[in-house]
Image: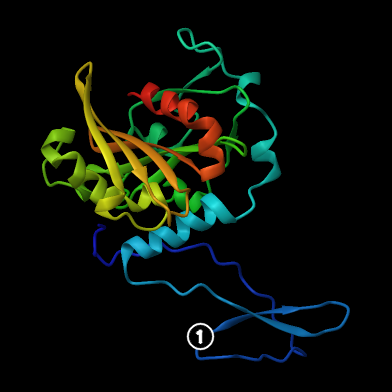
Amino acid sequence: MASSSSSVFSPLLRPSLRLPVASVTTRSSVPHAVSVDSAAAATQPAPLAVVSHRRELVVGTALGALLSATPLPVGAREVEAGKYLPPAPSSPGFVFFKASTKDTPALRAGNVEPYEFILPPTWKQLRVANILSGNYCQPKCAEPWVEVKFEDERQGKVQVVASPLIRLTNRPNATIEDIGSPEKLIASLGPFVTGNTLEPEEIIETSVEKIGDLTYYSYVLETPLALTGSHNLAKATAKGSTVVLFVASASDKQWQSSEKILKAMVDSFQI
């Protein structure tokens, strides 16, 4: 279940090139971009993205394209985490990541408290597109944004998603319990786990854990139609003006070999 509000999370669109000698052909009333072959001066119409009025579908389009389909910059995949992150003290075979103000716009703006988790040393950090990072709206973002992403093509991917508290409750500085049950929270943030939608029957397991002063909700999801992967694990908490969600995703093939690794990563997440 996802919210039916009409906020728009627009995908990136690239400007088209127009030359006086080029002709334009269209298939429908939807505008098309014109690309010109410099050798043949031929035109090839390229359809622009059509923005849905439903938040969950728009979010799914933007997140799905960037999380599962769009090729990422080569530079974002160059360095394995084990080459620059320290070993995790109590978890052999893992390295330790703790976010700081140099990592994301929200941390620099003070909208998110520093968070931490472990990951295998072979995983690589991916670049977060500016439109998803919240860089353009800090410190007053109205919609969730992506903090950081890591991936191993053989094992899966993880991401940290932050949502402004006001999107979920009118109570300032609310705890995660103030927002509601684990099921109510994931119903609102489900599209940011799956990349499109989340149905109630896809929630296999929920749990509640207290770590220090904060309560965490954890989830096991079986999502066969999700853009992020058919297996998703998530863990969320609220602090200050933000709800922070840690998500681990895998395909069926990745899940067979990495289930325990992904669960260890999710279990380690905390603020």
Q: Choose between 155 and 204: the one closer to the eye.
A: 204
Q: For the point 15% across and 46% down, which residue is it?
A: 169
Secondary element type, mark 1: loop
Location of residue 236 (image quadrant): top left
Judge the density around disc 1: few (<14), some (14-19), many (≥20) Cα neighbours within 10 Å.
few
Give the image location of residue 52, x and y in percent: 38, 72
Give the image location of residue 269, x and y in percent: 37, 25
Q: For the point 39% across and 58% down, which residue is it?
A: 196
**Compared to 28, does 39 lie above or below?**
above
In the displayed image of the protein, which residue is found farthest to the right?
Answer: 39
Would you name the residue on which mark 1 appears? Answer: 30
Q: For the point 37% across and 24% down, which residue is it?
A: 267
Q: Is residue 100 left or right of residue 208?
A: right
Image quarter where the C terminus lies is: top left
Give the image location of residue 209, x and y in percent: 22, 24
**Compared to 128, does 226 lie above or below?**
below
The total of numbered circles placed on residues is: 1
Image quarter where the N terminus lies is: bottom left
In the displayed image of the protein, which residue is found farthest to the top?
Answer: 89
Type of amino acid at the residue the image marks with label 1: Val
Q: Choose between 214 and 137: the one closer to the eye.
A: 214
Q: For the point 41% across and 47% down, which residue is it?
A: 134
**Compared to 136, does 111 lie above or below?**
above
Give the image location of residue 99, x and y in percent: 45, 26
Q: How is the image coloured?
A: rainbow
Q: Is residue 100 visible?
A: no
